[in-house]
Image: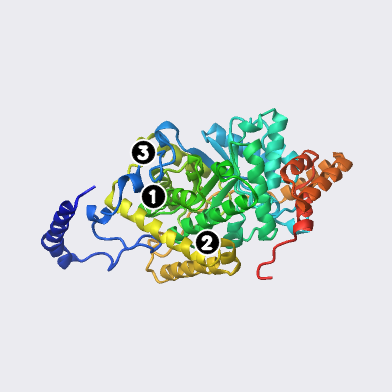
Amino acid sequence: MFDEDDLEAIREAKADWEAETAGPTLDRFGEREETFTTDTGGQAVKRLYTPDDIADLDYEDDIGFPGEEPYTRGVYSTMHRGRLWTMRQYAGMGTASETNERFNYLIDQGSSGLSMAFDLPTQMGYDSDAGMAAGEVGKAGVAIDTLADFETVFDGIPLDEVSTSMTINAPAVVLLAMYIAVGDKQGVDRAELRGTIQNDIMKEYIARNLFIYPPEPSMRLITDTFGFAAEAVPNFNTISISGYHIREAGSTAAQEIAFTLANGIEYVEAAIDAGQDVDEFAPQLSFFFNAHNNIFEEVAKFRAARRLWARIMDERFGAENPKSKQLKFHTQTGGSTLTAQQIENNVVRVGYQALAAVLGGTQSLHTNGKDEALSLPTEQSVRTALRTQQILAHESGVADTIDPLAGSYYVESLTDEVEAEARDIIDDIDDRGGMLRAVDAGYIQQEIQDVAFERQQEIEAGERIIVGVNEFEVDDDPEMDLESVDEEDEQRQIEQLEEVKAERDDDAVDEALDAVAAAAAGDDNVLPPVIKAVKAYATVQEICDVFREEFGEYQPGV
């Protein structure tokens, strides 16, 4: 990019600038901080960046062109000039009918994809009438007990016209089976189904703790999904390997991509060990990242993640299909950055985070509602969040050229630094025997906790300013209308479940569950019998209990 003579001239000019121009100003006024770092403190931020900071970059090998290795500039050749990112809004409103109403509202408002939140009982494989579910039905998302609930959620919504992302992990095979069953009932060709199941159990062991089964059988369910989907639902992403929750738990940006890609390595290795061809299943892998407030750090993180994954798939797994090397990802703005104080400020935070995601080349984006620090978002806050994306897409100009920050001395240098740090972390995980062993030993969890603790100390000491929380406070925040779940919804959900059980064919259910048990105990793929079971209206818990009986339940530290 620059030869050595050019670089030497730049170094001399910079030295002159520091002495003659910047120096007197610094002597007189100083700077706001003694040292500057990125938001997560991983990289020092210099006063000025020049071509000397990217002197070691090779354009073709390190940056390249969109749609070509190493995919630093994007996985598609035209990126957002050809097709805008999918605009999703997370929704799950207590009951299936309420969720259907919210989904239709979002579609009417211009949302191009649906994102489905499930309540805690569903995420843990319990039905609404279970003792463990009491008081939690419909609270954190929609309650799903049987296929009847899914049929209600998607009533009037053709599955060949929408893309649906489902935030479900341990019971992912059951919910995917329900989605396929609804598509079958609508007469939709399975090859036309589009969407994503999160299905990332590793991050549950690390950050969220919503797991059911031990790691080994959990990985078996995931690889069965890979194998089934490659043939049956080739346009459905079989996993969303999630750094989002890792970042929410407190990690740095570099840790977010390192731990996420290390999880990805674990899934790829498990599928290969199960006899699958990397170039058959890897194109259906997708990723899920967080977007925080530091625009440049986030853009660098996304660019570094794409480049690093392409190199991992090439160097470690010998992938030949270009789609196997393309890191496609969904982004959600940072829930942990939202504040209960002065919640209108959250609209601004979300706008900057969405900007970073688009500049970083995301394929899909969810923008948080301003009130999500307090409750499920209201229709008004969801509309504002969606309008944030639409204004970015149609008024800001950021989608009009591909990777517009490429070539920035700062962004390219930071991209290189984030990738190098993430690679070092992955190497350390390899030395510890891989991600499963590192998680089992508590190493990953401790690394995240240490960062989160340091961050909280900085906030409490006033070293890190959170606007409206520890600086620029107001005496009173105005009251807001907040979304709430009707306490009677739980009883209605239980009554609906009882009706389904009373009307279904119990012999067909028993036969279907026996087939699921036989597949789980043997080597057959579990998806076909699970699909038959949900079509017989077996419940989420009945199917999950079959797996509990065969696989056991995970007890950390035992």
424 lies left or right of 199: left
Of residues 190 and 477, the one nearer the viewer is 190
Residue 56 position, x and y percent, is 28, 54
407 lies left or right of 22: right
Find out whether the residues at labels 3 and 2 contact each other: C-beta distance under 8 Å: no
Instruction: Give how far apart the Cα atoms at labels 2 and 1 are.
Output: 20 Å
Q: Which residue is mark 2?
A: 249
* Image disc number at residue 402: 3
Q: Is residue 362 visible?
A: yes
Task: Tell me the quarter of the picture where residue 210 sits.
Answer: bottom right
Q: Which residue is mark 1?
A: 299
Mark 2 closeness class: few <14, some 14–19, many ≥20 residues within 10 Å: some
Q: Secondary structure at mark 1?
A: helix
Of residues 444 and 480, the one nearer the viewer is 444
Q: Residue at left 58%, top 33%?
A: 162
Instruction: Give how far apart the Cα atoms at labels 3 and 1 are.
Output: 13 Å
The mark that comes first in sequence, 2 or 1, is 2
Residue 71 position, x and y percent, is 41, 44
